[in-house]
Amino acid sequence: MSSYLLRRIARWPRPGALRFDRALLSIGSQPEFSSSMGPLAPSNFRLMSSTSRAQEDESSSQNSISSLVRLINESAKVIEEHYAKSSTTVPSLDSITAHSLDEQIMSNELRLAVQTMKGACAQLSNTVGKPDITVLTKLMEHWYTTCMFIALKSKLPDILQEKPDGMHVSEIEEKTGIHRHKIGRILRLLVSKHTFKEVSEDVFANNRLTAKSGVYLADILTDKDWGHSLASNQTALNRYTGYPGTMWEYFESEDTVGSQRGARFGRGMMGWTGVLESNALVCDYPWHELPSNASFCDVGSGVGTMSMELAKAHRNLRFVLHDKPERLKQAEHEVWPKLLPGVLAERRIEFVPLDFMKESPESGCDVYFLKNIIHDWSDEEAITILKNVRDAMAPHSRVLLQEYILPPGHRVSDKESGIIKQAPEPLLPNYGAGLIQQYCLDIHILNLLNGQVRTLAQYIKLGEAAGLKFVKLREVGQTGVVEYIRE
């Protein structure tokens, strides 16, 4: 791994950095991340080694991609021929019936083909993916193990066998004791890795991988006091630290460890923005349509990472940063003087402390921007925040929520597909492992804050409840920007 990438990783607020997951289920283990190609022939080993030289030789990189695709195609042919000789079809992931060949020992030829295909697919995805996104995804995949543990402890495979065509999360809640919103999110992450399947919205069923799984009982999510709580101060973080308030209060507290983590979090979010390419908003939004000297109100700004990028690119914008006092102190006296002293000298920015749960931001701004804010809160709290923003809006104002948008795990109608991008078949509608980090992050936020990464439909409903009308969804890097106006 390059020193550049290691420096990028060091700035990320990566899962496990505060060891909160240990407080959730005390699993104490991490999954292995392997892209081993298995016992391939020596010629194929030489072929794969060309990938390691890709940075030096563009032609070699292209050849490596083509060679990996060739290996996948050749392996697929061997596998299909094997099933054809056995007069059986290739197993379907959607099937819950044991395949006639499942119990048979693989021939050496078939085993090599399967190993080659699995290794080539993994190496191909790692080759073409951006290194920082790829490593970030690996860092977050321990949530898959956590969710599998919960599913098995909750006897989900046995429960879902009662209704092979699918069971709604409300019924799953009755049978497991786990809140329907939480168990639904856990299942969606698992569905993205082809473990279980989402038949329709909030309806889940077993598939080939789960039909014969073992069963146990999850402890933490069936806790009689906290299992159904959506409070942001009844989380794994609170169980681990013993701190009675929310994570944000912990970061602002006099607790030395908490305040140090808060400062580290503020710095880490700067690197996180680059990794997820969320600063593409600087170019991907029609800022030129705003009036001269337009006001950009950054609500829950942290140190103002996005405002910095906009300040460098659009000199016609002036900025108001709203956050807790400690974070704004860091922004005003440490970050901005070092990185953008000219903006301070030009007086294009204000640092105004705000509790967005109790107060409205500065009134009449052209743009109210909330980046990765709403996913930290329950629906009720999120609506409160958005109502406070709406109360400050003028008729010309607009709200931009930059958030991770969870794509549905089931196929949606043609009407809905106009604004919700779906993967081409036969891929899972939500791109499966291609967007697994979104689902891992959802569970990560559940652990820290009882928050939630939402679908577009959920963001539209939140806006409506707060008196905001949905206008458009824009794809920006790994995130989406939901735009509202006043109703």
Image (tube, helix red, strand yellow):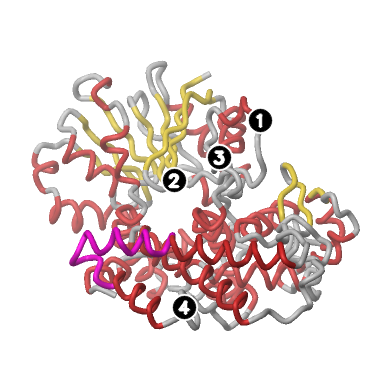
Pick out the residue farthest to the front: 85
C-alpha gap between disc 4 and disc 1: 39 Å
Q: Is residue 355 above or below residue 449?
A: above
Across and down, in percent, residue 245 comes to 54, 63
Q: Which residue is mark 4?
A: 36
Q: Is residue 478 left or right of residue 321?
A: right
Q: What span is colored magenta in the figure?
A: 52-69
- Secondary structure predominantly adopted by residues drawn in magenta: helix
Cβ atoms at labels 4 and 1 below 8 Å apart: no
Q: Which residue is mark 3?
A: 422
Give, as a three-letter code, the residue at label 4.
Ser
Give, as a three-letter code, the residue at label 1.
Ser
> Could you say which quadrant of the image residue 59 lies in?
bottom left
Give, as a three-letter code, the residue at label 2.
Asp
Compare marks 3 and 4 and give the one earlier in the sequence.
4
> Could you say which quadrant of the image residue 24 lies in?
bottom right
Give, as a three-letter code, the residue at label 3.
Gln
Q: Which residue is mark 1?
A: 413
Secondary structure under tag 2 reads loop
Across and down, in percent, residue 1 comes to 29, 75
Q: Is 65 included in the stretch rendered in magenta?
A: yes
